[in-house]
Image: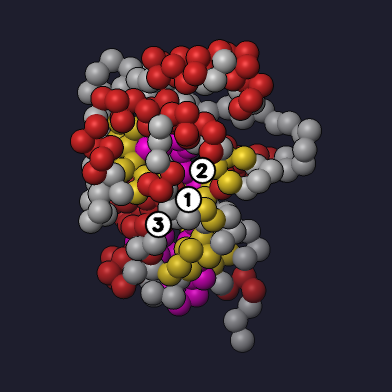
């Protein structure tokens, strides 16, 4: 009989400069770890991009390393989950091919679009009351508006928009979804559990370009056969919704109640 601690989960933390991975048992004990780094691209001052393929190759490499170092039977791995950098913008065409590098959270190209949106909705004061906070050129909706205004061909060819977590779940399972915490980085009504439709409408962004919403605990699917073979795992491994790294840090600190607070410190290899 297999003991509780003899079943495992693989977790990937896809941060700003590297993916850090662990194999953990159901007691919460970490067996082994792995890390893969990736680069930034700076096409213009203030722009910070990364190649989504680099994230994926890091995931595959780390997973194989975890399985090799641990010598765990792959059939005992129950699931895989991603905790990722927030606010990424990755566009896929109708054939699910990449149309752009990931426009990262560090990127600040859309200051003009941020001001445009706030002015359209009554200025900074009224906007912050409607939405809850002022926005800047680093926020996602202004950057989506920037793409529509400055790269209209890319916008028109875009069939699906995902963030980093959504892209990795798609590569792992073939299914395109958008998890709630990632949606919060775009514009999400936490009471209605739906997009902030007013904000998207004001920005002129088509919500039909976004896949269905899922929760962090939802089982999105299982590994594609070719992915399972690459990773040295069975196709039965479940892939779950996961979350942005900011929310993951909050849960890890034990802060999960309304009105509670914690201090969250992080680093970035790119310009801020």
- Residue 88, position in %: x, y? 40, 37
Instruction: Point out the image quarter for the N terminus.
Output: bottom right
- Residue 152, position in %: x, y? 24, 32
- Please identify the quarter of the rendering in which residue 5 is found: bottom right
**Is residue 78 rendered to the left or right of residue 170?**
right
Q: CA distance from mark 2 to mark 3?
A: 13 Å
Task: Using the image as rendered, state which of residue 260 and residue 188 is in the foreground.
Answer: 188
Residues tagged 2 and 1 counted as in contact (Cβ below 8 A): yes
Residue at the (66%, 21%) spot, across then down: 129
Judging by the rendered image, the residue that carries numbered circle 1 is 178
Residue at the (39%, 68%) spot, across then down: 223
Magenta stretch encompasses residue 58: no
Relative to 155, residue 61 above or below: below
Relative to 40, residue 78 above or below: below
Q: Which residues are magenta?
A: 63-89
- Residue 29, position in %: x, y? 61, 59
* Neighbours of disc 2 within 10 Å: few (<14), some (14-19), many (20+): many
Residue 182: numbered disc: 2
* Neighbours of disc 3 within 10 Å: few (<14), some (14-19), many (20+): many
For label 2, the SS is helix
Judging by the rendered image, the residue that carries numbered circle 3 is 176
- The answer to whether residue 16 of the structure is visible from this angle is no
For label 3, the SS is loop
**Is residue 1 rendered to the left or right of residue 149?**
right
Residues tagged 2 and 3 counted as in contact (Cβ below 8 A): no
* Neighbours of disc 1 within 10 Å: few (<14), some (14-19), many (20+): many
Residues tagged 3 and 1 counted as in contact (Cβ below 8 A): no
- The answer to whether residue 199 of the structure is visible from this angle is yes
């Amino acid at each position: 009989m297999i003991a509780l601690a003899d079943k495992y989960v693989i977790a990937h933390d896809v941060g700003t400069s590297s993916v850090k991975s662990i194999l953990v048992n159901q007691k919460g004990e970490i067996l082994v770890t792995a890390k893969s780094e990736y680069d930034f691209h700076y096409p213009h001052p203030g722009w910070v991009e990364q190649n989504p393929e680099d994230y994926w190759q890091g995931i595959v490499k780390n997973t194989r390393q975890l399985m090799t170092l641990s010598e765990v039977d792959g059939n005992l791995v129950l699931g895989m989950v991603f905790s990722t950098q927030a606010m990424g913008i990755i566009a896929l065409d109708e054939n699910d091919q990449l149309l752009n590098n990931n426009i990262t959270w560090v990127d600040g190209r859309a200051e003009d679009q941020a001001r445009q949106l706030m002015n359209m909705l009554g200025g900074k004061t009224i906007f912050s009351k409607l939405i809850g906070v002022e926005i800047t050129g680093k926020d996602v909706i202004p950057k989506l508006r920037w793409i529509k205004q400055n790269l209209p061909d890319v916008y028109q060819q875009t069939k699906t928009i995902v963030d980093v977590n959504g892209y990795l779940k798609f590569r792992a399972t073939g299914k395109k979804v958008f998890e709630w915490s990632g949606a919060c980085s775009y514009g999400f009504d936490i009471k209605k559990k739906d997009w902030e439709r007013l904000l998207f409408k004001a920005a002129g962004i088509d919500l039909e370009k976004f896949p269905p919403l899922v929760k962090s605990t939802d089982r999105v699917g299982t590994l594609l056969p070719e992915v399972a073979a690459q990773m040295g795992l069975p196709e039965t491994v479940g892939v779950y919704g996961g979350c942005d790294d900011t929310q993951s840090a909050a849960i890890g600190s034990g802060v999960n109640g309304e009105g509670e607070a914690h201090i969250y410190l992080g680093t970035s290899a790119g310009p801020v």
